Image (tube, grey):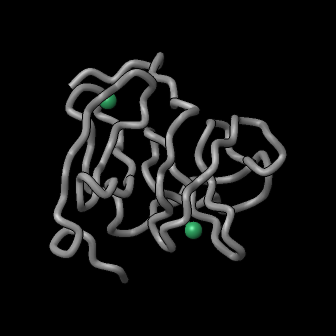
Amino acid sequence: MIVTSVDVLSRRLKPLCSRDNHVMKYESAGSRANSGDEASYHCGSVGCSARYNPTNGYFMLIGMPDHANAVDEPGVNTLTCPRHGRWLYRREGTEAEAGVRWLCGVEGCDHRYSANTKAEWVRT
Ligand SMILES: [Zn+2]
Ligand SMILES: [Zn+2]
């Protein structure tokens, strides 16, 4: 498994929040709302602080700006890209392709994994 530092988080993804299924929005590193040091996607729901990027998977930022730590969302991150070794994000299937898709967040990567919604995704 090769992990390089040049993997870039794509800006064109529509990852779903691991908690409430909201589509998460891209935030570059250093933007006002993103206190971490890496670009990530952020759920905009009130009271929800879930984030995603390929390095951390689904996570929350805990702490103050400039001193924030990424804390894994428990039980959410289960799949990695075989090409990049990075965490996959969850995306809703279209009507034509029912179920849940897990995709790699690294720009230009087309790795995807199909999961049966009811069997694989248990809300906690
Ligand atoms: Zn959320
Ligand atoms: Zn990948």
Residue 71 image point, x, y percent: 52, 60
Q: On screen, 94 above or below 44?
A: above
Taking the view exactly as shown, the residue that stands out farthest to the front is 96
Residue 51 image point, x, y percent: 56, 55
Residue 67 image point, x, y percent: 73, 50
For the image, the number of numbered tags is 0
Q: Quadrant of ligand 1?
A: bottom right
| Front residue of 3 and 11 | 11
Q: Residue at x 28, y 33 (%)?
A: 85
Which of the 4 image quarters holds residue 76?
Answer: bottom left
Q: Residue at x 68, y 45 (%)?
A: 36
Q: Which quarter of the rendering shows the N terminus?
A: top left
Q: Residue at x 84, y 46 (%)?
A: 32
| Front residue of 97 and 81 | 97
Residue 86 image point, x, y percent: 35, 37
Q: On screen, 53 above or below 1?
A: below
Q: Is residue 102 left or right of residue 14?
A: left
Q: Residue at x 21, y 46 (%)?
A: 113
Q: Which quarter of the rendering shows the C terminus?
A: bottom left
Taking the view exactly as shown, the residue that stands out farthest to the bottom is 124
